[in-house]
Image (cartoon, rainbow, N blue to C red):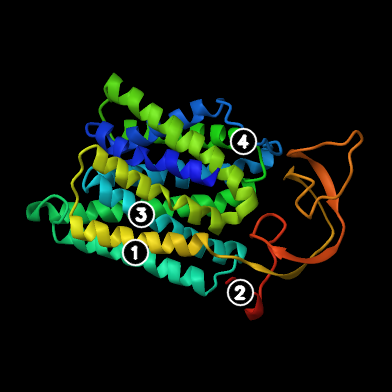
Amino acid sequence: MALAAACAFGVTTPLVQRFGVHVGPFATAALLYAGAAMASWIPLGAPPGAKVRARHAPRIALVALAGAVVAPVCLAWGVQRTSAVSASLLLNMESVFTVLLARAAFREPIGPRVTAALAAIVGGGVVLLLASANGGDVGEGASRASLLGAIAVMAATLAWAVDNALTRPLAELDPSRVVLAKGAAGAIVATGLSIVAGESRPMAGASIALLACGATGYGASLRLYLSAQRTLGVARTASIFAVAPFVGALAAIALGDRPPLVASLAAAALCAIGVALHLTEHHTHRHSHAAAFHEHTHRHDDEHHDHTHDPPFQGEHSHPHRHEPVTHDHDHAPDVHHAHDHDHDHDPA
């Protein structure tokens, strides 16, 4: 699900650049997340979750502000001022910011392998920024605009990282309802800002294309991302999602974008090393679970849910349930059951 989410999002970045040429950044953000809200009703086969309740509204509002207003506005503004390949590869910075925020907010462990991965991805981002500053994207005369565009794309990744961290407590909820609420709220706010900013009304063709990009790359992608995050945790889902920039870069090249070859290849190589280090990380140690009572989507073959149903139930389902205390040792990710602290002997490999 995380890989599917990455592909759906990645391919839309060069398309947003192409169809958003004469569309303001606020209007672009509004159309993208209106499409995401519309796509929340499309069945994807992702498992349902717990119900969205009134107490979740404040967090969903913050998620919408960061991820459905600030991030797409920055992206829409930035991709019009730098190459689509560079913008796509810069999206790798989202995984860096997300891992750091996951460490700060949820105490998810960062071991030597993840540290090396972050360093490689940051190195790739620096290469692209230097290329933009030297006019490598659109010529010497536009180097300042290109650099500002690259910085705006990085600002979008930071906003989406904040979105990822804020979304983690919502990952156990029904993803279609979370996407509907986030998309609708983001579209309404962005539309209001577009009117205040005096942006012109987009043409019908561009509007339909951006709605379709939103439905695929922001609606369907986010629903799959939330479902994956339940199992993998914030940092590891973001690591797999880092495949998205490479999908976007390949799509941009297929659409005719011609970035600075040496800088793009160097940045892609560094980012690929970072993603590979993330994906090959393993984390296992002896740990204890305290007694708990909560509700989330779960299975009965995952070493944590041994309660019974009458009649028996197979597959994923959601209902309030109780956990008895247990201590065991297995490979795990920082999901809803593994938010424990780590000492130096328990760092991931």
Marking on residue 270:
1
Q: Name the residue nearer the viewer: 55 or 331.
A: 331
Residue at 56% from the left image edge and 25% from the top image edge: 41
| Cβ atoms at labels 2 and 1 below 8 Å apart | no
Q: What secondary structure is marked by label 2?
A: loop
For marks 4 and 2, give the CA distance.
Answer: 31 Å
* The N terminus sits in image quarter: top right
Q: Residues within 10 Å of mark 2 (few under 14, many from 20)?
A: some
The spot of residue 90 in percent (x, y) is 33, 54
Residue at 40% from the left image edge and 46% from the top image edge: 70
Marking on residue 347:
2
Nearer the observer, disc 3 or disc 1? 1
For marks 2 and 1, give the CA distance.
Answer: 24 Å
Instruction: Name the side, left or right, on which 262 lies relative to 196.
Output: left
Q: Earlier in the sequence, mark 4 or mark 2?
A: 4
Q: Is residue 176 visible?
A: yes
Residue at 55% from the left image edge and 40% from the top image edge: 224
Q: Residue furthest left?
A: 141
Q: What secondary structure is marked by label 3?
A: helix
The spot of residue 322 in percent (x, y) is 85, 50
Q: Earlier in the sequence, mark 3 or mark 1?
A: 3
Q: Residue furthest right?
A: 310
User: Which amino acid is tagged 4?
Assistant: Ala
The spot of residue 265 in percent (x, y) is 26, 58
User: Which amino acid is tagged 2?
Assistant: Asp
Q: Which residue is mark 4?
A: 46
